[in-house]
Amino acid sequence: MITITAGPFTALDGPTAYAVWKLRQDVFVVEQQCPYPDLDGRDDEPGTRHVLLRDDALPDEPGLLGYARVLDDGATWRIGRVVLTPPARGRGLADHLMNTALEVSQGRDVVLDAQAPLTGWYATFGFEADGAEFLEDGIPHVPMRLSR
């Protein structure tokens, strides 16, 4: 059974927090070959929300399939670290992550830095390019905004 939840850092138990950081490291640092400081000090901020996509039928706890992080940037919300495990890709599950991230980021504009090939997918949620393409860790990104 697929479930999706969103909550603060204090709601993450040890195994879940470990699974989140391992998934982010496996994809963003190892798979995409971008050594960067993933643990940036923002995970435990009071306004941060962690969106967790799980399959409760998986034998390993916590059955994490995907993740997204919503940051409270004051005037805007910022969505980032949107990631799925390799077996979860191509099944439409990322849509559930984004929909939940958008549900917890009400009342203000939402910004994100999209990897360039994903700008069309983010546009399906109402995001529009909000600046020039730039390189981050050798990967082209486009700043995007959802105006509310």
Image: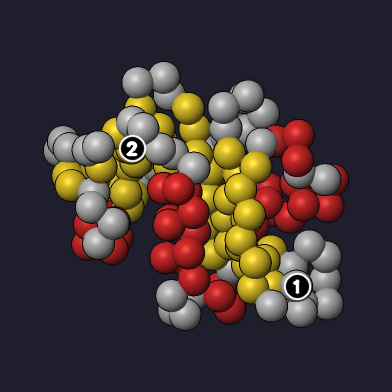
Mark number displayed over residue 56: 1
Q: Secondary structure at mark 1?
A: loop
Give left or right: position of 49 versus 72: right
Give left or right: position of 60 versus 135: right
Q: Nearer the viewer, residue 109 or 122?
A: 109
Q: Residue furthest front?
A: 107
x, y (%) of residue 76? 35, 27
**Number of marks in picture:** 2
Q: Are marks 2 and 1 in contact (CB under 8 Å)?
A: no
Tell me the quarter of the image containing the C terminus.
top left
Mark 2: few, some, or many residues within 10 Å (few <14, many ≥20)?
many
x, y (%) of residue 126? 23, 52
Q: Secondary structure at mark 2?
A: strand
Mark number displayed over residue 110: 2
Mark before the other along the chain sequence, 2 or 1 = 1
Q: Residue at x 69, y 73 (%)?
A: 55
x, y (%) of residue 11? 75, 40
Q: Nearer the viewer, residue 42 or 100?
A: 100
- Image colouring: secondary structure
- Against 32, residue 54 (above or below) is below
Q: Residue at x 23, y 49 (%)?
A: 127
Label 2 to label 1, Cα distance in Å?
Answer: 30 Å
- Against 36, residue 124 (above or below) is below
Where residue 2 sits, quadrant-wise, is bottom right
Where residue 3 sits, quadrant-wise, is bottom right
Q: Nearer the viewer, residue 72 or 43?
A: 72
Q: Residue at x 43, y 24 (%)?
A: 73
Query: What's under tag 2, amino acid-wise?
Result: Val
Query: What's under tag 1, amino acid-wise?
Result: Asp
Q: Is residue 110 visible?
A: yes
Give left or right: position of 92 versus 57: left
